[in-house]
Image (cartoon, rainbow, N blue to C red):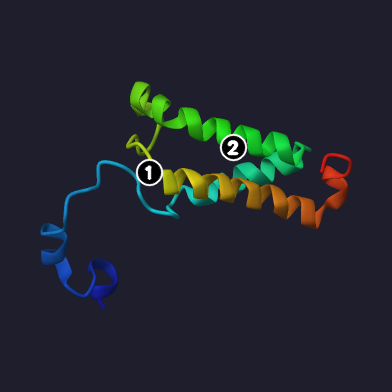
Amino acid sequence: MSHLLYGRRGALAQATAPTQSPYIDAWVDRYSIGHYAVGVLMGLGRFPWWLALGLSIGWELVEDGLKSNLPAVFPDARPEALNNHFTDIVFNMLGWGTIATIYPEQVQGYI
């Protein structure tokens, strides 16, 4: 049962694990759900798709700079790899698209 908490190799694997990468290079990470939620909020806020996409891209363009200047504001201040920026934008737009699909009247005239 302890392998559920510590993995099959136990504490030794944790002690000898490689050091953390200097940047976030995962395609999907624990913040992906937050990006999805922001997209949902943009859909509920009746943002047109092009504005939601523009804000998503704009955020990703300035995010690493903000992380380096205000690291205390971010739970993980490491810069992101290009693939992570890309999927953050995808998750934002998936959230927006969910609202556009479930509540088309919410974004009617804005698509």
Give SS at disc 2: helix
Q: Which mark is residue 104?
A: none
* Residue type of the residue flagged with mark 1: Ala
Name the residue located 79 percent from the left edge and 57 percent from the top edge.
102
Badge 2 local density, few (<14 within 10 Å), some, or many (20+)?
many
Quarter containing the N terminus: bottom left
| Residue 15 point in image, percent of width and height | 11, 58
* Residue type of the residue flagged with mark 2: Ser
Quarter containing the C terminus: top right
| Residue 13 point in image, percent of width and height | 14, 65
- The image shows a total of numbered marks equal to 2
User: Residue most toward the front?
Assistant: 82
In space, the residues marked 2 and 1 are separated at their CA atoms by 16 Å
Q: Is residue 110 left or right of residue 14?
A: right
Q: Is residue 84 left or right of residue 72?
A: right
Q: Nearer the viewer, residue 79 or 2?
A: 79
Find disc 2 in the rendering and name its residue: 56
User: Residue most toward the bottom?
Assistant: 1
- From this view, report whether residue 39 is shown above or below residue 67: below
Badge 1 local density, few (<14 within 10 Å), some, or many (20+)?
some
Q: Is residue 93 left or right of residue 72?
A: right
Name the residue located 11 percent from the left edge and 59 percent from the top edge.
16
Find disc 1 in the rendering and name its residue: 81
| Residue 81 point in image, percent of width and height | 38, 43
Which quadrant would residue 5 be assigned to in this image? bottom left
